[in-house]
Image (spheres, helix red, strand yellow):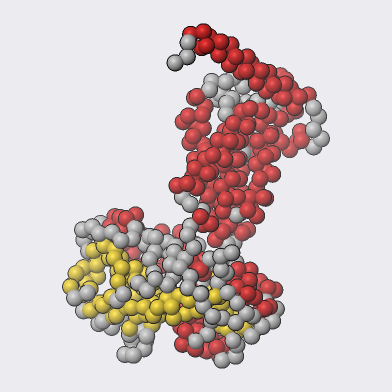
C-alpha cells in the first residue's frame, strides 16, 4: 500500500503531465490554424459536413457494393457500415460522457474554414474520426483493395475536424483509435471471410490448362451477370472456347462441350452450374466454375469469387473433389432418372418462395423480391402433408443440404466442408405461425431440436405419401414430384477447379 507521502507526490506529477499534454495539444491546434493549406479551404469543410450522421460512409458503402459487383465488395461495404454503427454507439453512450471537454475557441481558426453549424456536443473524442476510422478499417478487413481506396478519404475527414477548428488533435486521435477498436471488436464477434476455416478439400486430379487451352466454357446468357463475366473470362483465358447460349439451349451445349475439351467450364448461377455439374460428373471431367449468377452459393463456398480465382486454379491445375447430392426420381419423374443438387433440395414453402422470388426479381431486384415472396407465400398457406422416414406428419419446410450449412433460410449460410458425405436435414413442423417457426429454425442453426423444428445429419432421406405434382426446389430450380422421393449423396463424385490455400 502506498503511503500518503507517495500519493501526494504522484498527484503533482500527473497534473504536470496532463498540463504538458494539453499544452502540446493546443500548440498543434494553433499550428494547424495558422498555416495556409493550398486547396484545402474549399474542400475540407465540405468533406467534414458530408460526413455528418455517417452520410458520406453510407454513400461510399453503396458505391462499393455497386461498383465492386462481387461478394467480397458487398461484404466489405456491409462490414464497414456495421463497424461504423458499433463505433457510433460507443461514442454516444460512453465516449462523449466520459470526458467533458469543451470545444476549441472558434476564433482561432480563419472564418473561411469554420463550419456554418458548430457542433454542440463535448469535444472528446471525435465522433467523425471514430466513424471514419471504423468504416475504413471494417472495409479493409474484408477487402484490402477497397480499404486502400477508402483510407485516404477517412484520413481527410479526420484531419478536417482539426482544420475546421471543431476538435483538438487528441480528440481526433482518440476517436480514430476507438473506431479502429470497434472494427476489430466486431471482427471478434463476426469473423471475416478470411478468418473462417477453409472448407473440406480432398485434392482432385485435373489437368493444368494455361490460358484456358482445351477448356470449353458454356455461358447462360440470361443468368445474372454472366454476359459481363464472359467478357472477363475471354480476357483472362484467351485460349478457351467460350459459348454463350440461351437457357433452353444449355443442356445440349454442355453435352457438346463435354465432348470437345479436357475440362468443362460454366458461367451462370447455381441452377446453371447444377446442369454443368451433372454433365461433368457423368463424363468424368473436371468442372471450372465462373460465378455469374445472382447468389453463386456453390462458387463462394469453394472460395471462388472472381474470374481470376478460377483462372489461377486452371493455370496451376489445382482442383478438389466435392460431394454431389442426388434425388430419385429426377425432375422428369422417370424411374431410374436421377436428379442432382450441389447446394440444397427442399419441399414445403421454400419452392413456392423461390418461384415467387424469381417472378418478381427482374422487376424489383433480388432481395426485395425475396421479402415480397416470403410475405406472399406464408400468408394463408397450409403445411405440407408427407411421410418422412416412415412417419406421416405436417411440414412447413423440409430442407436437405449437400453438407452442413451454418443456417437455413432464403439465403443459406456458408459450408465449411463440401465433402463430408452427409446431408444437412432441417424440418420445420406444421403448426400455427409459420413465419415465427421458420425464423426460429434459422436462428437455432444446425444440429438442434425443438417442438417446432429439428436439424439432424443423415446419409439418406426418404419421403413418401406425397400428393402428385408437389413442387420441390433444387439449387434454385423448381420441379414437381410423384408420390415418393429418395435423397442421398454421391461422395466426392465431382472434381472442381479451385484455388488451394497457400
> Residue 156: x and y, percent?
69, 39
Residue 407, above or below 289: above
User: Which one is in front, 209 or 52?
Assistant: 209
Label tally: 0
Q: In the image, what residue occupies the spot 60% across and 90% down?
A: 260
Residue 52, above or below 436: above
Q: In the image, what residue occupies the spot 50% across and 24% down?
A: 98
Res. 438 visible in picture: no
User: Which one is in front, 350 or 296?
Assistant: 296
Residue 375, above or below 26: below
> Residue 443: x and y, percent?
34, 54
- Residue 331 found in image quarter: bottom left
Query: Could you tell me which quadrant the C terminus lies in?
Result: bottom right
Relative to 333, 269 lies left or right: right
User: Which one is in front, 305 or 54?
Assistant: 305
Query: Could you tell me which quadrant the N terminus lies in?
Result: top left
Q: In the image, what residue occupies the spot 61% across and 43% down?
A: 56
Relative to 227, 343 lies left or right: left
Res. 280 visible in picture: yes
Relative to 400, 186 lies left or right: right
Q: In the image, what residue occupies the spot 61% across and 45% down?
A: 136
- Residue 47 found in image quarter: top right
> Residue 483: x and y, percent?
25, 82
Relative to 396, 210 lies left or right: right
> Residue 356: x and y, percent?
40, 68
Residue 136, above or below 304: above
Amino acid at each position: 500500500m502506498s503511503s500518503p507521502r507517495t500519493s501526494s507526490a504522484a498527484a503533482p506529477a500527473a497534473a504536470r503531465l496532463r498540463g504538458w499534454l494539453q499544452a502540446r495539444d493546443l500548440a498543434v491546434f494553433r499550428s494547424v490554424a495558422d498555416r495556409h493549406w493550398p486547396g484545402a479551404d474549399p474542400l475540407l469543410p465540405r468533406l467534414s459536413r458530408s460526413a455528418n450522421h455517417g452520410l458520406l460512409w453510407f454513400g461510399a458503402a453503396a458505391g462499393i457494393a455497386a461498383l465492386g459487383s462481387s461478394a467480397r465488395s458487398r461484404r466489405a461495404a456491409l462490414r464497414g457500415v456495421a463497424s461504423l454503427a458499433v463505433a457510433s454507439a460507443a461514442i454516444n453512450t460512453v465516449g462523449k460522457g466520459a470526458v467533458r471537454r469543451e470545444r476549441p475557441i472558434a476564433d482561432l481558426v480563419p472564418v473561411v474554414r469554420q463550419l456554418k453549424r458548430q457542433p454542440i456536443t463535448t469535444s472528446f473524442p471525435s465522433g467523425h474520426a471514430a466513424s471514419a476510422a471504423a468504416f475504413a478499417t471494417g472495409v479493409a478487413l474484408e477487402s484490402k483493395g477497397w480499404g486502400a481506396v477508402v483510407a485516404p478519404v477517412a484520413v481527410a475527414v479526420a484531419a478536417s475536424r482539426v482544420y475546421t477548428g471543431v476538435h483538438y488533435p487528441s480528440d481526433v486521435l482518440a476517436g480514430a483509435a476507438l473506431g479502429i477498436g470497434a472494427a476489430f471488436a466486431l471482427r471478434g464477434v463476426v469473423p471475416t471471410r478470411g478468418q473462417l476455416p477453409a472448407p473440406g478439400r480432398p485434392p482432385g486430379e485435373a489437368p493444368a490448362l494455361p490460358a484456358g487451352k482445351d477448356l470449353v466454357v458454356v455461358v447462360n446468357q440470361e443468368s445474372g451477370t454472366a454476359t459481363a463475366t464472359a467478357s472477363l473470362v475471354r480476357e483472362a483465358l484467351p485460349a478457351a472456347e467460350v459459348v454463350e447460349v440461351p437457357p433452353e439451349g444449355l443442356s445440349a451445349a454442355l453435352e457438346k462441350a463435354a465432348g470437345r475439351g479436357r475440362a468443362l467450364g460454366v458461367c451462370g448461377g447455381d441452377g446453371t452450374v447444377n446442369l454443368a455439374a451433372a454433365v461433368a460428373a457423368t463424363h468424368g471431367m473436371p468442372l471450372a466454375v465462373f460465378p455469374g449468377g445472382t447468389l453463386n452459393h456453390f462458387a463462394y463456398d469453394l472460395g471462388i469469387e472472381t474470374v481470376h480465382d478460377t483462372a489461377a486454379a486452371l493455370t496451376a491445375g489445382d482442383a478438389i473433389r466435392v460431394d454431389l447430392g442426388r434425388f430419385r426420381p429426377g425432375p422428369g419423374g422417370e424411374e431410374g432418372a436421377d436428379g442432382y443438387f450441389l447446394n440444397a433440395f427442399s419441399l414445403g414453402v421454400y419452392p413456392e418462395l423461390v418461384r415467387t422470388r424469381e417472378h418478381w426479381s427482374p422487376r424489383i431486384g433480388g432481395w426485395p423480391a425475396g421479402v415480397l415472396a416470403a410475405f406472399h407465400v406464408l400468408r394463408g398457406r397450409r403445411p405440407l402433408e408427407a411421410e418422412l422416414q416412415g412417419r406421416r406428419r405436417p411440414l412447413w419446410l423440409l430442407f436437405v443440404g449437400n453438407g452442413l450449412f451454418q443456417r437455413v433460410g432464403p439465403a443459406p449460410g456458408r459450408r465449411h466442408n463440401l465433402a463430408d458425405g452427409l446431408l444437412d436435414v432441417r424440418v420445420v413442423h406444421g403448426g400455427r405461425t409459420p413465419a415465427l417457426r421458420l425464423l426460429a429454425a434459422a436462428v437455432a442453426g444446425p444440429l438442434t431440436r425443438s417442438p417446432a423444428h429439428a436439424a439432424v445429419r443423415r446419409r439418406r432421406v426418404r419421403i413418401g405419401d406425397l400428393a402428385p405434382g408437389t413442387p420441390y426446389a433444387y439449387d434454385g430450380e423448381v420441379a414437381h414430384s410423384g408420390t415418393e422421393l429418395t435423397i442421398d449423396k454421391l461422395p466426392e463424385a465431382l472434381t472442381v477447379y479451385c484455388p488451394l490455400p497457400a
